[in-house]
Image: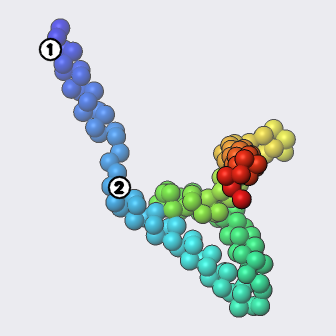
Amino acid sequence: MEETRKKKQEAYENYVKQKTPVHNVYLNMLKAFVTGGAICVVGQWINNYCIQLGLSKEVSGSWTSLLLVLASVILTGFGLYPKMAKWGGAGTLVPITGFANSVAAPAIEYKKEGQVFGIGCKIFTIAGPVILYGIFVSWLLGLVYYLLTKVGIVL
């Protein structure tokens, strides 16, 4: 009985080894670096081009963000952004394009369920917590800053 249990345990361990994906951490980091860097290079190119057209730095930055978000949503719609994310990993998640993808992907996926219960309910499935906690932490840090100024620690 003990021998049967050991064989089952060994068979299970072999099965787990076969099914568990092996990741090369350094290769994944390189892919993320290249992907995120490429997105940032495109953003810098857009920003430089806008400044070259005579726009101010603030307006150029706004156009850069707008065009990167638009490109991300279009690539998500055509199913290309998920392929980039699969190859580049976190490199596609960090820039503003990753946030745009996280909003657009559920909207596209759940559009068949209708405007309200599909898109309306699911659009912020991933991005909602980011927005919520971002606003909450901003409020909390503002409160701490306010209290520190009242006490006289911060001028």
Residue 142 against residue 42 in the figure, above or below: above
Say what secondary structure mark 1 lies in. Answer: helix
Residue 70: x, y in percent? Answer: 72, 67
At x 28%, y 37%, the residue is: 17
- Give the farthest residue toward the front: 152
Q: Which mark is residue 3?
A: 1
Residue 133: x, y in percent? Answer: 68, 44
Contact check, label 2 and label 1, Cβ < 8 Å:
no
Q: Is residue 110 visible?
A: no
Identity, as a three-letter code, of the amino acid under mark 1: Glu
Q: Which mark is residue 59?
A: none
Residue 144 against residue 45 in the figure, above or below: above
Residue 112: x, y in percent? Answer: 76, 44
Identity, as a three-letter code, of the amino acid under mark 2: Val
Of circles 2 and 1, the one toward us is 2
140 and 106: which one is in front? Answer: 140
Say what secondary structure mark 2 lies in. Answer: helix
At x 65%, y 56%, the residue is: 99
Residue 105 against residue 44 in the figure, above or below: above
Q: Which residue is mark 2?
A: 25
Q: Please tell me how crowded label 1 is: few (under 14), some (14-19), or many (20+) other residues with Cα within 10 Å.
A: few
